[in-house]
Each structure stands twice: as structure tokens, then as C-alpha cells.
Image (cartoon, rainbow, N blue to C red):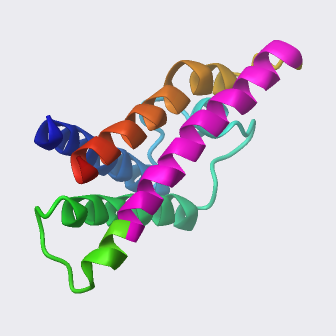
Amino acid sequence: MQMAALVVATLTLTGVAIIHVAWGMGSSWPFTTGEDLARNVVGDRDRMPDPWMSHGVAGLMLFAVLLLLAAADVIGAPVSETLVNVGAYGVVAVLAIRGIGGLVMSAYLYFVQGDRTPFVRNDIRSFSPLVTVLAVLSYLGSFT
């Protein structure tokens, strides 16, 4: 179970990092235009964030993958086990906060404020639940 959780979490994070690199390079995948991508994925009606932001997110995700793999003793790390574990717990915490916090915020916007924008709907249906599951899988894969 631990290895399966780790594999799913790290492969998913790596895949999402690759998508962020593609977006930073100008891709609008899986949409046809950058405007559609921005409306559905970022919540901005006009444009995507600057490329360096997408690349930064990708870099942080790949660093998170390394921390999770090191915490599970799959790879070695040039720092202490304590520092690796603190970092990996940080990854789990950030994912959990984004997942649960995003769901709460988007549900508030949707149900209380009446915000029916594509991003809010996608965050409730897909983004926040996925990130919450990634938090759980990251914990199970690295610490159980």
C-alpha cells in the first residue's frame, strides 16, 4: 500500500509539473486558447500568469517529489533525515491546505456568492479533491 501510494502521488505530481512547464512555454492544453485555459484553470478572465510562475510551480512540485521519495527512503538525500521529514511533512501540509482550503473557498463562492465561473466549478469538481487525495497519498507513501 505504501509503495502504491507513493508511486501514484509522485507520478501525478510529476505529470502536473510537466503540464505547468508546457503552460509556461505557451501551451493552452487541454483547451484551444490561452483565454479558455486562464478561465478554467486560473480563474482569470483574460490571461495566464507569467511563464516564470508556471515554471516556478513546476519546480516546486518536482522538489516535492524528491522530498517524498527521500522521506520514503527510495532515494538518498544530502541532508539529515530530520530535514527531509520536515520538508516532506511540509509538502503534505501544503497539499492538504490547498485541497481543503480550496474546496471550502470555492464552495463558499459557488453556493453563497453565486459564482458560477468555470474555475470555481472545476475547483469544486476536480482541482481541490485531486490535491486533497494527493496530500493523503503523499502522507501514506512517505510516512506509513
On the question of residue 61 being in view, the answer is yes
Residue drawn 20% across and 45% down?
A: 6
In which quarter of the view is residue 118 placed? top right
Is 128 in the magenta?
Answer: no
Locate residue 76 relative to residue 93 in the image: left or right.
Answer: left
Question: Magenta stretch?
Answer: 86-112
Tell me: residue 125, above or below residue 54.
Answer: above
- Image location (x, y in percent) of residue 93: 50, 52
Looking at the picture, how far across and down is residue 49, in whole percent? 64, 55
- Is 11 in front, or is 99? 99
Evaluate whether residue 12 shows in this view: no
To which quarter of the image does residue 59 belong? bottom left
Determine the residue positioned at 70% across, 29% down: 104
Please indicate whether residue 65 sits to the left or right of residue 106 in the image.
left
Q: Quadrant of the N terminus?
A: top left
Prevailing secondary structure of the magenta residues:
helix
Decide: is 143 above or below 35: below
* Residue at x 58% of width, y 23% of height: 122
Q: Is residue 86 left or right of residue 73?
A: right
